[in-house]
Image (cartoon, helix red, strand yellow):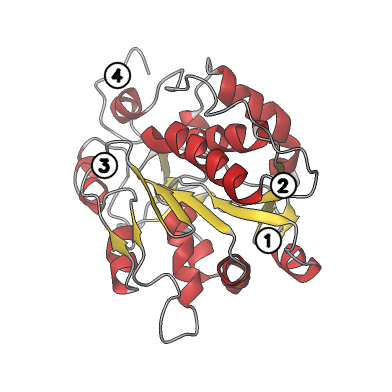
Amino acid sequence: MTENAQDRTPTPDHAEDGAYFPSPYSLSQYTAPTTDYDGLATEETYTGGRWKVLVVVTDERYMRMTNGTFFSTGNHPVETLLPIHHMERAGYGIDVATVSGGPGKFEWWAYPSRDEAVQAAWEATKGDFKAPKKLADVVAGGLDDYAAVFVPGGHGAMNGLPSSTDVRDALDFFVGHDRLVITLCHGPAALLAAGLGREANPFAGHRIVAFPDALDVGANIEIGYLPGELPWTLGGRLEEDGIEVTNGDMTGATTRDRNLLTGDSPLAAHRLGKESALALLEKFGR
């Protein structure tokens, strides 16, 4: 990447015909070896031993673009692991689940190789991501001990999660039992599952921040982050379901509406992690 940092041509992923990673230039703009992590929000920890956080991640690697190419995506490592670091250090157990029960996929090209907080979270949870629980089994077994569900971003969250009735059933529990729902960037795509088979989405009327459509239909194609146009736009589809996306750009913003906590991008991962830990301690710190 250092030798070709101005190259805006998406990089071929030779594991799949017609698949691409982001271009060297886009990675130089969007990734870094460290994050903005500057410590925990509080030294307070939950010691009750009951409450956990259910982390629902995508198990799908490739997103087919409108031009027939595939974007090699998955879960964004910063958006996934930095919030987990805050919640785990606050004393909450972490369970990882995917729709199929297959391994969670990561956008490994975005892993911050010199970030100690992200590395610590990965070492603590990598076995769970490589051999996660099947979401349907988690739902069938009961969700009573989960204080929150966390859905990280990465464009991979737009694959599978929005059309999963298992995701819908899990969200039903968290909404109906006054638990927290935490998500960021493209992760709010999972909120669309809540409306499956219904006249209205239970999250209609909620205000969130998410990755802006303006970047996905514009700059992300121009700089070669994406190999083509997305099959659908996140904000547009959320708005169709009555969920209001309040941001138009990517600044690291977060917001909370009732029990729904959201962040706009990887830039929000640290702040959202802090806010999530504090929200968990306030609501389930017993």
Residue under circle 3?
Answer: 220
Q: Is 100 displayed left or right of 23 in the figure?
A: right
Contact (Cβ within 8 Å) of mark 4 with mark 2: no
Q: Which mark is residue 158?
A: none
Q: Residue at x 78, y 43 (%)?
A: 48
Residue under circle 4?
Answer: 5
What amino acid is at disc 2?
Answer: Arg
Q: Which mark is residue 286?
A: 2
Question: Residue 33 at what x, y percent from top left?
Answer: 46, 18
Name the quadrant of the N terminus. Answer: top left
Real-space CA distance between mark 3 and mark 2, rounded to the nearest whole angstrom: 44 Å
Real-space CA distance between mark 1 and mark 2, rounded to the nearest whole angstrom: 33 Å
Question: Residue 86 at what x, y percent from top left?
Answer: 58, 33
Q: Nearer the viewer, residue 282 or 155?
A: 282
Residue under circle 1?
Answer: 100
What amino acid is at disc 4?
Answer: Ala
Foreground tag (1 vs 4): 1
| Above or below 64: residue 61 | above
Q: Secondary structure at mark 2?
A: loop
Q: Secondary structure at mark 3?
A: helix
Real-space CA distance between mark 4 and mark 2, rounded to the nearest whole angstrom: 50 Å
How many numbered dots are placed on residues in this image? 4
